[in-house]
Amino acid sequence: MRRRSPTSYNLAVMPPVWPALLLFFAASATPRFDAGVQFYESGDCAAAVRALAQSERLSEEAPARAFYQGVCLAKQGAWDDAAARLAPYAAAHPDQARAWYWLARANLHRKKFIEARDAILKAIGLSGTSADAYRTLGEIELELKNYQGAYSAWMRANDLNSQDGRTTYYLGRLFFEADFLDEAAGWFRRTLKLIPNQFAAMTYLGLCSEHLNDRETALQLYRAAIAESTRQRKPYCWAYLDLAKLLRQLGRDKEALDLLQKAEEAGPEGHVLTFMGQMLAPSDPAAAQAALRRAIALDSNIPDAHYRLAMLLRAAGNSTEAQSEMQEFQRTKEMEERNKAKITAFRRDSPDQ
């Protein structure tokens, strides 16, 4: 891979080495490409993308430019643009594992799961000791509903790098969905040791505690997850929802509704609005209907939203729309049950195996 590695590009400061660097870039045949690589290596992807675009406009001869553009675009979340750069580059350089890895990441986020799996398997074939690659394979297999494949990939990733909290979190989620609560809690605790501010792991550990009849610990973990996600400016709707459900079980309905309203203000989510509709139905059917319609608009695959809206419509005498919603309930419920059957087919005795 052709590239250069200048050491600084801060034009606001002129240390003694700058005259030599200026001479270096003046002599370079690819000064904007070299600048882009330097920005990339310093972690400034936005500046790297600008410099690499300039390099492209100037027609600098830099075969690796598409790789750096693709990776920087991927890191910025511009997944379509990243794939457009990385796909032809990886095809032209089939021996470069990192190109296939980043193409897989881009296709995963584009929901092109088959293409993503093909790319990540190529990366693993070239570099079979990459924990990141196996973790990504697990994410892809999960999307493809291959839960045993996801488990195997994540266990391999954990073997290669036991300090990656992302992998331990994924394993905890898999065990939780398969209803192995003790094993799931063990993985979530490991995650929080590695990443103490991982609010999703706090939430799922709270769910484990709640299911294991430790409600006080669950309340503390949900509140901690809400506080942490708020501090990070990434409000986590599931922590709000799980806390609201537990508060309702404890007879604290007003607190639960207030919490759901805060969750909607922080960022509307279908499951939160579905539970809000459920809580509002006895006292304010019109508000409940509105909440359930917002839930379905956000996510049309929530069975409970369709069912509860159908019941409200039937009670209001709107039998035609109620029947339509009940049909949607049946469709989404069957889909949910198929997914649950695949998850429960996943079986291991212990996360340590």
Image: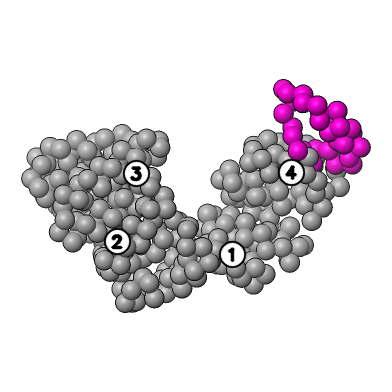
Where is residue 205, by image quadrant?
bottom left
Q: How many marks?
A: 4
Q: Which residue bears the numbered disc 1?
A: 130
- Residue 244 seen in render: yes
* Secondary-structure class at tag 1: loop
Give me the C-alpha separation between circle 3 and circle 4.
Answer: 35 Å
Mark positioned earlier in the residue sequence (4 or 1): 4
- Binning the other alpha carbons within 10 Å of mark 3 as few (below 14), some (14 to 19) or many (20 upward) gives many
What residue is disc 4 on?
37
What distance separates the C-alpha of mark 3 from that of mark 1?
30 Å
Position of the C terminus by quadrant: bottom left
- Amino acid type, residue under disc 2 in the picture: Ala
Q: Which residue is mark 2?
A: 185
**SS under mark 3:** loop
Give the answer, above or below, for where 221 lies relative to 134: above
For the residues marked 2 and 4, what is the alpha-carbon distance in whole angstroms? 42 Å
In whole angstroms, how far apart are the C-alphas of marks 3 and 2?
19 Å
Q: Earlier in the sequence, mark 1 or mark 2?
A: 1
- Residue 61 in percent (x, y) is at 86, 47
Name the kind of residue labelled 3 in the image: Tyr
Q: Residue furthest front?
A: 16
The answer to whether residue 71 is above or below residue 14 is below
The magenta stretch spans which residues? 7-35
Provide the residue designation for mark 3.
Answer: 236
What amino acid is labelled 1 in the image?
Ser
Locate residue 328 relative to residue 142 in the image: left or right. left
